[in-house]
Image (tube, helix red, strand yellow):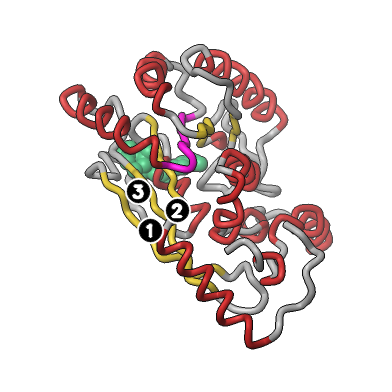
C-alpha cells in the first residue's frame, strides 16, 4: 500500500467506504477449508475472522458442505467501520465417513478454482498422513493458492505448553519444528507446486498472525487488501491467554508484535476500489 496519498477530504470518506463495501459485496474474498475431521478448520476461521462456524469436540462440527458469506464489520480503518464480506467454503472433515468423501471431493473440485486461497489444515499430533495425501493428489490440479496449516500445536508432546507466556515449551518448540518439516515433506510430494506450511494453535491464538500473513500473501495480489481489512484478531487475543506475564513483560511483547495490528488509513485504501 502507498503512504503517499494525501489525507482524504471528509466528504470523500463516505463515498470511499461505500465503494469498498460494494467491492466486497460484488466479489467477496473467498477461502476454502480442507482437512480431516476435527483438525480445527472451523476454529481457525473463527479465530482469524471472528465468524461463528460451529465447532465440536466430539462428533462432526460442520454438518454439511456449504458456502457461507459472513458480514464482518472491519474496525481496521481509523476513519470509519466498514462492512466487509467473507465467503467460506467449509465442509465436514474428509475421512470421517467413506460414503461421503467422494461427494465432498467432487464439490471441492467444482468450487476450489473460484477461491482466492485454499487452507488445508492438519492436526499436529496426527502423524498418519495417507488420507491427506490421497485427497491432495485428487485435488492438486484444481487447487488455487494453497497454504498448509498445522493446527493444535499446543497438544504436541511433551504436552507442557507454557501457559505463562502462551507459547510452546522448549521441548514442544523442537517437536513442532520436526513436525512441520515432516508434514511439509510428506504433503509436498502430492502437490503440483511447493506451498507454505505454518504451525499454529487456533485455540491459543499462537502464531495465528503468521498463518494470516501467509494466507494474505497466497491470495491474488489485487485482493490482499480485502483480506487485510477482514482480520479480526490481534496481539491482545494471544496475550490475553498469557496468564503469567508481568505488566512490563506484557507491554514489551505487545510492543514487539503490535505492528501487525496497526490501523489501515482510508488514504491507503483510496485507489484500490
Ligand atoms: N487444543 C486445541 N484444540 C483445538 C484447537 N483448534 C481447535 N481445537 C478443538 O478441536 C475440536 C475440533 O474443532 P473444529 O473447529 O470443530 O474442527 P473441524 O476441523 O472444523 O471439524 P469438522 O467440521 O467436524 O471436520 C474442537 O474441540 C476445538 O475446540 C487448538 O489449536 N488447540
Ligand atoms: Mg468444521
Reading the chain from its start, which is encountered first: label 1 or label 2?
Answer: 2
Picture quarter with ligand 1? top left
Residue at (62% x, 19% y) in the render = 181
* Residue bounds of the magenta highlight: 115-123
Name the secondary structure under disc 3: loop
x%, y% of residue 233?
A: 58, 58
Label 1 near ligand 1 (CB < 8 Å)? no
Answer yes or no: do the residues labelled 2 and 3 have beta carbons within 8 Å? yes
Asked if residue 213 can be seen in this view, the reply is: yes
Residue at numbered disc 2: 46
User: Which image quadrant: the C terminus?
Assistant: bottom right
Tell me how far mark 3 sits from mark 1, CA to CA.
9 Å
Quick check: is 145 in the magenta stretch? no
Name the secondary structure under disc 1: loop
Which mark is drawn over residue 55? 3
Describe residue 103's horizontal placement relative to residue 126 as left or right.
left
In this rendering, which labeled residue sits more in front, label 3 or label 1? Answer: 1
Asked if residue 57 can be seen in this view, the reply is: no
x%, y% of residue 123?
A: 46, 30
Amino acid at each position: 500500500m502507498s503512504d503517499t496519498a494525501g489525507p482524504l477530504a471528509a466528504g470523500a470518506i463516505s463515498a470511499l467506504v461505500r465503494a469498498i463495501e460494494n467491492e466486497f459485496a460484488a466479489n467477496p474474498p473467498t477461502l476454502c477449508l480442507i482437512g480431516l475431521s476435527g483438525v480445527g478448520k472451523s476454529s481457525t476461521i473463527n479465530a482469524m475472522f471472528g465468524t461463528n462456524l460451529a465447532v465440536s469436540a466430539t462428533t462432526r462440527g460442520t454438518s454439511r458442505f456449504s458456502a457461507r458469506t459472513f458480514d464482518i464489520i472491519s474496525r481496521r480503518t481509523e476513519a470509519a467501520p466498514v462492512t466487509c464480506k467473507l465467503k467460506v467454503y467449509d465442509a465436514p472433515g474428509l475421512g470421517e465417513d467413506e460414503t461421503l468423501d467422494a461427494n465432498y471431493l467432487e464439490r471441492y473440485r467444482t468450487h476450489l478454482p473460484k477461491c482466492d486461497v485454499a487452507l488445508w489444515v492438519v492436526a499436529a499430533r496426527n502423524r498418519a498422513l495417507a488420507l491427506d495425501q490421497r485427497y491432495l493428489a485428487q485435488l492438486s490440479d484444481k487447487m488455487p493458492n494453497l497454504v498448509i496449516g498445522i493446527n493444535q500445536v499446543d497438544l504436541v508432546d511433551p504436552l507442557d505448553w507454557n501457559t505463562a507466556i502462551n507459547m510452546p515449551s522448549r521441548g514442544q518448540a523442537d517437536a513442532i519444528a520436526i513436525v512441520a518439516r515432516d508434514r511439509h515433506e510428506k504433503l509436498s510430494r502430492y502437490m503440483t507446486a511447493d506451498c507454505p506450511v505454518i504451525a499454529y494453535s487456533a485455540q491459543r491464538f499462537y502464531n495465528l498472525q503468521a498463518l494470516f500473513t501467509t494466507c494474505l500473501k497466497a491470495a491474488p495480489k489485487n485482493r490482499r487488501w480485502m483480506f487485510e481489512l477482514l482480520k479480526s484478531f490481534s496481539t491482545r487475543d494471544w496475550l490475553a491467554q498469557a496468564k503469567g506475564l508481568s505488566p512490563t513483560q506484557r507491554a514489551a511483547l505487545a510492543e514487539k508484535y503490535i505492528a501487525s495490528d496497526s490501523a489501515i488509513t482510508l488514504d491507503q485504501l483510496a485507489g484500490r476500489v
